[in-house]
Amino acid sequence: MLAIMSVGLIFTFFWDARATVLKRALRWVSSLPAIWVQTYSQV
């Protein structure tokens, strides 16, 4: 019983961490065009 609970806790933690990383990656990807525009407009 305790093993199942700890596995569930670890799974939840990793799922939450993965969701956070995914959100951060999406935000980074969405900011890429703006970075490109700034870079190429300076050249």
Image (cartoon, rainbow, N blue to C red):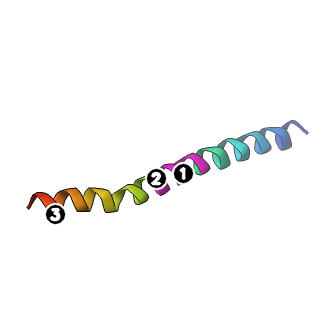
User: In the current view of this chain or complex, which residue is farthest to the right?
Assistant: 1
* Mark 1 crowd level (few <14, some 14–19, many ≥20, 10 Å Cα): few
Identity, as a three-letter code, of the amino acid under mark 3: Tyr
Q: Which mark is residue 7?
A: none
Asked if disc 1 and disc 2 are in contact, CB closer than 8 Å, the reply is yes
Nearer to us of marks 3 and 2 is 3
Distance between mark 3 and mark 2 Cα atoms: 21 Å
Q: Which residue is mark 1?
A: 23
Q: Which residue is mark 2?
A: 27
Query: Between disc 3 and disc 2, whose residue precedes?
Result: 2
Relative height, residue 3 to residue 21 (above, below): above
Q: Quadrant of the N terminus?
A: top right
Label 3: state its secondary structure: helix
Residue sitting nearer the eye, 21 or 10:
21
Q: Is residue 43 left or right of residue 40?
A: left
Distance between mark 1 and mark 2 Cα atoms: 6 Å
**Residue plotted at (41% across, 59% down):** 29
State yes or no: residue 30 in magenta.
no
* Mark 2 crowd level (few <14, some 14–19, many ≥20, 10 Å Cα): few
Residue sitting nearer the eye, 13 or 24:
24
Asked if disc 3 and disc 2 are in contact, CB closer than 8 Å, the reply is no
Q: Which residue is mark 3?
A: 40
Residues in magenta?
19-26
Label the magenta part by its dominant secondary structure: helix
